Amino acid sequence: MKLSQFNFTLPQELVALYPHSIEREFVNDKGEKESFRVYRRDESRLMVLHRKSGEIELFKKDSQGQPIDGQYLDFRNVLDYFGEGDTFVLNDTKVFPARLYGTKEKTDAKIEVFVLRELNEETHLWDVLVEPARKIRIGNKLFFDDAGVMVAEVYDNTTSRGRSLRFLYDCPHDQFVHDLYSLGECPLPTYVLNNRPAEPGMENMHVHSHATKEDMENFQTIYAKNVGAVTAPATGLHFSRELMKRMEIKGINTAFLTLHCSLSNFSQIEVEDLSKHKMDSEAMTVSKECCDLVNKTKDQGHHICVVGCSVAKATETATGTDGYLKEYDGWTSKFIFPPYDYQLADSMIANFYHPESTLIMSTAAFGGYENVMECYRLAVEHGYKFGCFGDSLLIVD
């Protein structure tokens, strides 16, 4: 397929810049009205695609099964399509505060450093992206705190923006990582930060907003466990503790695997022919426990639902020719786009993504290109939210 087939017009106001929330009002002791926002992960909108028939559901239904105009499905309704013995496969990767701000030695030029992954534990060597890259050369030193304690030296050039940094920090590894993360910010996508209201006093400066401590909590799934991601598995952000408890009561299983999501999902595709696009490698692990539960679900004829494109990629990487999930500990650069036959799952949940995103392509490969693009057309028409904090699409048979 061609890149241009996944292009569409997305109004900026439909890109979610914050998690789904509702505003509450109360009257204070002085009799004055005040308001506050409550974040509700599981109350964002849900659309449902039946991929075999092409039927698309947007609205809740009355007692006669008729859609109630204006009452949109929300994410909590996802459980209406599953029952006892079904299994949701979730990605338990944990996002770390990967965005750092430093200064260059001598010039004090401000530098943004996006930490990707550790290359060598003993020498504190890390793979990073720098901005502006033209100012950063091999041998330059960067300072990340006022005391000048957290210092890094540029060890090598890897790509146009990529560098290898060696942190000159003499302490045990665990202490180093703790101190490094304490200086970092939540790695929200730039399309979120660049479009949020400017911070006070910075309205006329061409800089993006900074992430907050609250963002670090909101940009994390509630079941995040294994540190290593530089962006969240966004579809998992919709799951609340209450929803997980309801799943447990209903007898729906949860199987966990780990895929450390990279920035590859946000990289612009430079080729029209999708077969020529290459994805960055991402580390992933599928345990025996996960395999046993998923394969048992398959044998018993129950539904297997992959939650998000990262899980879809991981399960397809680790599924054998016999259609069963295998243990896996390694890397994947799998790029899924139509036409593609998924081997394991029979249902999928995905967010609504930006035009020409690899994540749309993975979704379209599962639900069918025509079906999914019609869902996107309806999502724009009905004001659904897009992006990592956006609304979601459930695809079932």
Image: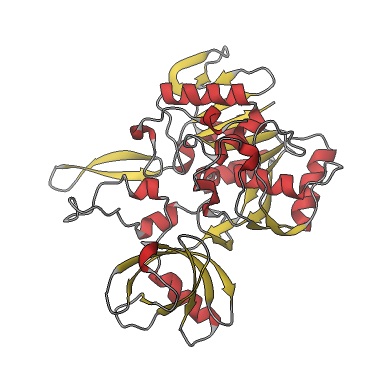
Q: Is residue 204 left or right of residue 107?
A: left
Q: Is residue 390 left or right of residue 346?
A: left
Which residue is at a point 41% across and 30% down the rendered structure image? 10
How far across and down, in percent of the image, does residue 173 sit?
54, 81
How far across and down, in percent of the image, does residue 356 sit?
51, 36
Which residue is at a point 24% across and 52% down the rendered structure image? 206
Q: Is residue 370 left or right of residue 315?
A: left
Relative to 120, say whether 324 is above or below.
above
Q: Residue furthest left?
A: 30
Please state which of residues 22 and 338 is positioned toward the viewer in this rendering.
Answer: 338
Please state which of residues 209 and 206 is positioned toward the viewer in this rendering.
Answer: 206
How far across and down, in percent of the image, does residue 75 sit?
52, 35
Which residue is at a point 18% across and 50% down the rendered structure image? 203
Q: How many marks?
A: 0
Q: Residue furthest bottom?
A: 170
How far across and down, in percent of the image, does residue 153 sit?
44, 78
Relative to 316, say whether 212 is above or below.
below
**Picture quadrant of residue 161:** bottom left
| Colouring convention used in this rendered image of the protein | secondary structure
Residue 248 appearing in the image: yes
